Amino acid sequence: MICIEGNIASGKTTCLEYFSKTNNIEVLTEPVSKWRNVRGHNPLGLMYQDPTRWGITLQTYVQLTMLDRHLSQISAPIRMMERSIFSAKYIFVENLYRSGKMPEVDFAVLSEWFEWITTNISLPVDLIVYLQTTPETCYERLRQRCREEEKVIPMEYLESIHQLYEDWLIEQTSFKVPAPVLVIPADHDIEQMLQQYEENKERILAAQRT
């Protein structure tokens, strides 16, 4: 189990597309289509418009769908997954709470759920690949790809997410890191990134649980 982590627009999709062409790898992208349509409702879009009101709604569903990803039946020897239930909590829920956009009671309920899940259910991860980008690069990429829900994302949001990732996976001072971390600088263009994935391919696919 390999989790690809990184800020919004850090290049996770490009990374997954590259490895999807390799034999014996199952690639699981984030279930964004589910977050955009829950029985006709779009909690992802609602959260970006009014995070204080809809943050708990989206993040409860994110936690459920990411747990489903972790527990789904494996169809190949290696599974590569976009983000994880851990970053959903340690990065995105944490950011909502620290920024004052999630009431303390909502944060407490989500935290209780997360702690129950991780205590009672085995969710092994063998390697985390961290695509390390600057917030400026992510902001420019967001402007270029023009996804509807992302049009309202300010630079400050990307800076906050970046710092939480750095504290978790680089400094390792905020939360428990569930697996070894491989850092890949990801500010480069697609051609350079594909070259980096090729250079790190064996190292990534040979990940051993420690």
Image (spheres, helix red, strand yellow):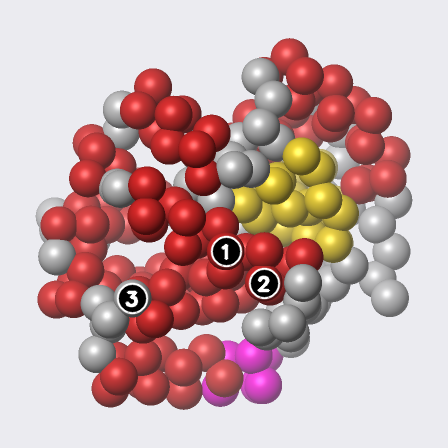
- Please name the residue shown 78% across and 23% down the image: 198
Residue 136: x and y in percent read 43, 33
Q: Secondary structure at mark 1?
A: helix
Q: Secondary structure at mark 3?
A: loop
Magenta span of residues: 116-121
Q: For residue 124: magenta?
A: no
The residue where tag 3 is placed is: 99
The label on residue 105 is: none
In the displayed structure, would residue 15 be above or below residue 26?
above
Q: Nearer the viewer, residue 104 or 57?
A: 104
Three-letter amino acid code of the residue under disc 1 = Gln
The residue where tag 2 is placed is: 167
Q: Quadrant of residue 17?
A: top right
Q: CA distance from mark 2 to mark 1?
A: 6 Å
Marked residue nearer the N-terminal end (1 or 3): 3
The residue where tag 1 is placed is: 163
- Please name the residue shown 28% across and 50% down the image: 35
Residue 100: x and y in percent read 24, 71
Mark 1 and mark 2 in contact (Cβ < 8 Å)?
yes
Residue 98: x and y in percent read 34, 71
**With 164 as the anchor, is 198 left or right in this view?**
right
- Please name the residue shown 33% across and 49% down the image: 157
